[in-house]
Amino acid sequence: MGLDLSFSEWLVQFNYFNDLAIIFSGRVFSGTLIAGIGIYFYRIKKLKIFFFICLVTGLGDLLGNFLKDLFLQPRPCFSHIDLFPSIDKCGPDLTGMPSNHALNFFIFSTLIHLFLRNSVISIIFFASSVLVALSRVLLIKHLLSQVIIGSLIGIVMGIIFYEAFQRWKKI
């Protein structure tokens, strides 16, 4: 956890990005992205795929919550309050491994990329995923390792469910 804390301590220096980090971590940002891509799927007449992506993202969220209960790794804003005394609010969730924000955004982005194969849309969604993941570290809600693990689980889950969908479609 040494590198995790060192990275968090370094990142906290840039607290002038906190307002931006709050935006990227918020529901309005994710809701806007989801609504926008939902409209796009509607326009290209692939709304069922969009609903599949949303369903898989929901399953990812459930998996993330299960893993948090399994690992019981605390969030840095609870476990290292001595290092981050400026934190006003940590939130009600005590555990942080893996980051569900990272997990969900990376599942969604991976599936968007695999289904659409549109490089502009893929770049927008993966860049958003990285910004959301980093915002969680900047806001001291997660350690870097918690965000990386969440991101990797999201990517792997996205690939697995995409492949399952392709096989199911052939039946």
Image: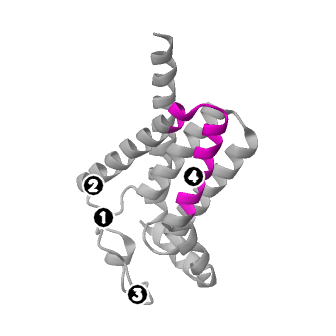
How far apart, in angstroms, are the residues tagged by discs 1 and 4? Answer: 29 Å
CB contact under 8 Å: marks 3 and 4 = no
From the image, give the main secondary structure of the stretch colored magenta.
Answer: helix
For mark 4, what is the residue? 35
N-terminal of the two: label 2 or label 1? 2
How far apart, in angstroms, are the residues tagged by discs 3 and 2? Answer: 25 Å
Quarter assignment of residue 56: top left
Residue type marked 2: Phe
Which percent across, then down, holds residue 33? Answer: 59, 55
Residue type marked 1: Thr
- Select label 1 or label 4 by which is in front: 4
Residue type marked 3: Asp
How far apart, in angstroms, are the residues tagged by discs 2 and 1? Answer: 8 Å
- Select label 3 or label 1 by which is in front: 3
In the rendered structure, find residue 95 and report the number of the disc placed on it: 1
Chain part drawn in magenta: 29-50
Q: Is mark 2 on a helix, strand or loop?
A: helix
Would you say residue 98 is visible in this rendering? yes
In the rendered structure, find residue 88 and report the number of the disc placed on it: 3
Task: Indicate whether 143 appears above or below 64.
Answer: below
How far apart, in angstroms, are the residues tagged by discs 2 and 4? Answer: 33 Å
